[in-house]
Image (cartoon, rainbow, N blue to C red):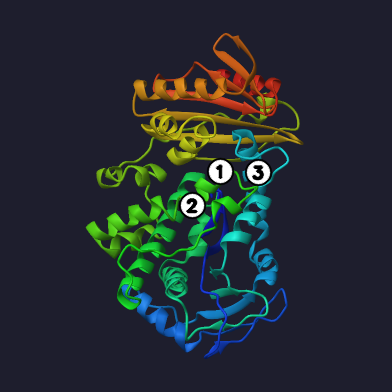
Amino acid sequence: MLKAPRWLAWAAVAILVVASAACSGGGNQAPKAASSPTPTLQPLPPQLATMLDRVASLRGLAPPDNLRAGFVSRSDLPALMDRLITADDRRVFAQTTTLYRLLGHLRKDQDYSSVYREFTSQAVAGLYSPQDKALWVVHPDAANVDLDNLSRDQASTLAHELTHAVQDAHADLLATSKRLQDNLDATLAWTSVVEGDAVTTERLYSAKYLALPLGHGSVILADRRLLNDVPPSISRELYFPYQEGADWIAGIRQRQGNSAIDAMLSNPPAGGTAAILHPELLASGFTPATISLPNLAGPLGAGWSRESGGTLGEFELRNYLQLRLPASQAVAAASGWNGDHYDVYVNGNQSVAVFRLRFAGTAEAQRFRDAEARFLGTMTASERSSGTTTVTTTTDGNATARLSVGAPEEAIFVIGSSSDIAARAAQGLAGG
């Protein structure tokens, strides 16, 4: 899985992670990983080199000639993950924490980095690291990896990881991840290309070499019941590339072949997640409207600065509403999305996010506004209206200010860490 929230823009932890083969047994075994935070990388073993050639052939791209392999024990995995996460990744994690606390994905005592750690501690059995050009295989402590006697699930999942290495040799995943990391919607759409391609290639490998029916993917993701402190909304976001993304890529491969996927590895669809949720948009050449917001650092007052900003996208809009509304209502309210922009401002422990959404028409915009009113109604602590602004303080301590300004096909709102901050930002927007 690629963690790139900002974004995944969520941000882009420049690692591609999914379950990879790990088992114990006899036969021609790879060496145990030493109990060390920096296990040794080695040339790709012959068994994995054969798999790589087969995966590359199925994918229609040349295999990399510099791929190495590493074997890391489960207890040493956290140290490896910490090494792979860069200072820039940590910056984006912190920015995601601010935004997701305001939206309601995280409690005020949660941070995105900790939630992601919990997810990966359950979900990761292996990963491809673009910075190391290496396939890391995770195994239980004190166990070996028997590459000659992999189970079908283990072999097919290794094929998934090797697909990432093939993609990287073609498109430089690290560079694309870096370029997109400050755009939440674009990064999630791109991650869906990367992971959707790996899932569908894995299925092709399984059907040809493992006698598994086509469509029986074996990407091993964390059992959601084990993710005790991973909020359901973040779980939905993390699973999106493997599920909706894989179905979408399968349709593209069937209609257009691998060449269309090759292009999107460097340039995800302009429509972002809307093009995944509505595949017909990609064929129509859909491009969202360009949306802007005024700089509110001045109107907010001394000490305020812009921390992040970008495009939320249709999936994230849907995921936000689904925090408090049934999925069917959230899906309906987010459909018709035609572009947006958000900015997040901070001042010490205070924060505020401003959003401007554009929809296909007036009816679609009103449908969203009605849904947002129901959403806020489920958690209202107090509410006050003044002129064109209604400020709703919610039971989580945040406050949402909705503005009846702008074009009829738009919805403009603010979420602040207090009602005063939300009102101040709303006033700055109304004046902008």
Name the residue carrying label 2. 239
The residue labelled by disc 1 is 232
Q: Tell me the distance, in whole angstroms, between the alpha carbons under discs 2 and 1.
A: 10 Å
Quadrant into which the C terminus falls: top right
The residue located at (60%, 44%) in the rendering is 231
Tag 2–tag 1 contact (CB < 8 Å): no
Of marks 3 and 2, the one in the foreground? 2
Give the amino acid type for the residue marked by disc 1 in the picture.
Pro
Q: Earlier in the sequence, mark 3 or mark 1?
A: 3
Which of the 4 image quadrants contains residue 428?
A: top right
> Please, what is the three-letter code of the amino acid marked with disc 3?
Thr
**CA distance for labels 3 and 2:** 19 Å
- The answer to whether any part of residue 207 appears in the image is yes
Q: Where is residue 28 in the image (x, y as percent from the top left)?
A: 52, 91
Which badge, 2 or 1, is on the more N-terminal residue?
Answer: 1
Q: Can residue 183 be seen in this view?
A: no
Reading the chain from its start, which is encountered first: label 3 or label 2?
3
Which residue is more in the foreground, 407 or 103? 103
Secondary element type, mark 3: helix
Q: State whether residue 96 is above or below residue 45.
A: above
Decide which of 261, 76 is in the foreground and name it: 76
Please state which amino acid type lies under the numbered disc 2: Tyr
Q: How far apart are marks 3 and 1 (CA)?
A: 16 Å
Q: Where is mark 3, residue-wise? A: 97
Question: What is the crowding at mark 2: few (fewer than 14 residues within 10 Å), some, or many (at least 20)?
Answer: some
Counting from the top left corner in percent of width and height, residue 95 is at: 64, 44
- Secondary structure, mark 1, is helix
Whether residue 158 is situated above or below residue 334 in the rendered picture? below
Q: Which residue is drawn at 56% across and 50% down?
A: 5
Q: Nearer the viewer, residue 62 or 108?
A: 108
Q: Is mark 2 on a helix, strand or loop?
A: helix
- Residue occupying image coordinates x 30% and y 59%: 260
